[in-house]
Amino acid sequence: MAVQDLSDLFGAGSELEQLIGRFSPRPGQVLMAKAIEEALADQMDLVVEAATGTGKTLAYLLPVLLQTERAIISTGTLNLQDQLFNRDLPLALNALGIEKDTALLKGRSNYLCLHRLEQYEKDESVRDGEWSDDFAAVYAWARHTLSGDVAELDSVGTDSGVWPFVTSTQDNCLGNECPLFSKCHVVRARRQAQAADLVVVNHHLLFADLSLKQTGFGEVLPGADVMVIDEAHQIPDTAMRFFSEGISAWQVRELARDSLAACGQAPGTLAILRKPTEQVRAAIDRAMARFADMPAKGEFSKIAGLVPEFESLIKALRTLQQGLSEVAEQSRDLSNCLERATSLEKRLGHFVAGDREYIRWFSNRSGRFSLNLTPLDIAEPLREIRAQTPATWIMTSATLGVAGKFDHFTRRLGLDHCRELIIPTPFDYASQTRLWIPKELPEPSSPHHTEALLEQVMPLIKASQGRAFLLFTSHRALRQAAIWLRANTDFNLQVQEEAARRTLLERFLSEPNSILLGAASFWEGVDVPGKSLSVVVIDKLPFAPPDDPILEATIKAATEKGERAFATVQIPHAVLSLKQGVGRLIRQAEDFGVMVIGDPRIKTRSYGRIFLKSLPAMTEVDAVNEAIDFLYEQFEEVDD
């Protein structure tokens, strides 16, 4: 189809208008679709910032479906992946009047593992233990599911402790040596993907495949004409994780548990493995006990004193390796445990020894720790991957640019030659919103900042009868705010970590006078259109904490190159995070609301101009009464 014909596909009287009840032509959508069509024709990579309301999903689906034989589309989350596959893709195919073989593919941990289900059905501690009801539900569901996608089973929560026992990971999957390989749900899903014209994946699976960290089934993704990366702002961090190497306390404990479980199918092996397994458990318990008093995150120097515990664990893993090597030939499960013990011992040794090209850092939650080696530079490995997969890459998100430029994004990903495009918002922010930056607030570092901000915004939130998101840059501030609000107001508080994300959002929408308090994970991917959300308060500019080990190393590397790290590293990261938070307020053309930024630095520091220039053009007010008057006017118009 010729470039100019795309206008007809998105225009008045089009099939899209017939299929979508509230459809209206959007110039930005056509502009984006044409840019993608031209990029595909010229085999040129394209980076597109498409503001909320552009309709970017259909803007890339239609030209991709028309111009390519095989496409991979990657989304940021499983929920977006399901939405794209089950809603947007069928809509696009209907609008075009064409047929394509499509497939939805998730990571292996999202599918029921029949072998592990069978293995742990014989384990009384699991079958009849803490998660016995959930195990029974999974066991019943396993008899009739065709896909094995765990999302089908609504009665068992995603946070249930049963899932690690009945799903597989890269470490414990037996691959084509599994006795139930012919019935494997992962195998079936991957074969469907290999045969499909268009495959919908998520970023984690994309990089697991591209970085060749998943084995046993062969590669699925190479061979595509185009890679469309939606929510592309997540890609740098996702890529960094998948180029990392690590070991966690969970992996070690799971290895010990699986080694004992495997003995049940191999007579005589328990006598050989009981003592080595106990030694591994004792060593990991000692390390976890030492970690109980350690910070939540930090670089290696903060845990250098734990090297004796690590060396003890290495020794215990080697002893378990020796025991497993004696019995590995008796079953594929025992052989798999030997491979895992060898890998974990090697990775732990690598972490202790260090590598100048990698950052050594840890994360910790009540002793449940993980140790990580993360590469400082991901541009080069990404260049190599893209050279091996000669497809056109389309990267898009609502938040990629900083003051109208993509340098920080393209440089980090090694995108040396690509086209760039910014699609401005179709919303009239000047009339739909008001921006209020409260005056006379303490500096963000002050212990009184959170309370002072809440006191200033409370008249506004009372005027809106709740209907507010309060977004915080730290969990400490979030908890402080929750305590203050419970002591001084009668709002229904929906507080992150007090319930599941979906539950909090359902309560926010259904319970009057509700306020939702969230930290990092609520700054993006939360969609509450209409007057249900009328106020968004952001407590501070979202600079990453200075003690973040990866940030520390990145700043050091940038400084050694002669860069001003604050300008090239910290400000771009914070600007993109702020844009995500601000993006919660206006989701559709009829929305309205007040945006509150409780950080005086956006006005008093020179870098504040970069933040303001990167945000939509909201009309600023000087006082809370002006913001309240605006809300009352909007409520009256809606009620009329």
Image: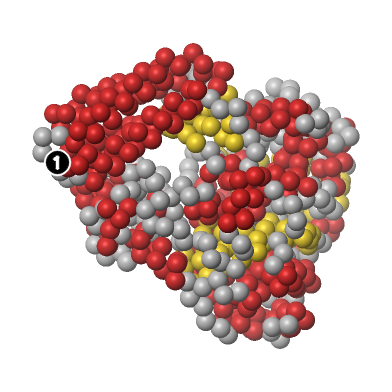
Residue 32, image quadrant: bottom right
Spot occupied by residue 92 in the image (x, y as percentages of width and height): 59, 76
Q: Nearer the viewer, residue 265 or 435?
A: 265
Q: Nearer the viewer, residue 548 or 12?
A: 548
Residue at position x 39%, y 46% in the image: 170
Q: In the image shown, does 395 or 480 lie closer to the viewer?
A: 395
Q: Is residue 325 left or right of residue 101?
A: left
Q: Where is residue 242 shown, x and y percent of the image? A: 53, 44
- At 53% from the left and 32% from the top, the residue drawn is 373
Q: Name the spot of residue 243 as percent of width and height, x first.
A: 55, 42
The quadrant in which the N terminus is found is bottom right
Q: Is residue 108 left or right of residue 579?
A: left
| Image: 141 above or below 204 | below
Q: Amino acid at mark 1?
A: Ala
Residue 183 coordinates in the image, percent (x, y): 27, 62
State which quarter of the image contains the C terminus. Answer: bottom right
Q: How many marks?
A: 1
Residue placed at 75% from the left, 76% from the top? 25
- The residue under label 1 is 266
Q: Is residue 68 above or below residue 268?
A: below
**How dense is the environment of label 1, judged by Cα within 10 Å: few (below 14), some, or many (20 and up)?**
some
The answer to whether residue 542 shows anywhere in this view is: yes
The vertical placement of 391 against 171, above or below, is: below
* Quarter where residue 457 is shown: top right
Front-lying residue, 74 or 461: 74
**Disc 1 on helix, strand or loop?**
loop
Residue farthest to the left, as pictured: 267
- Residue 530 seen in render: no
Coloring scheme of the render? secondary structure
Please name the residue shown 29% across and 38% down the image: 337
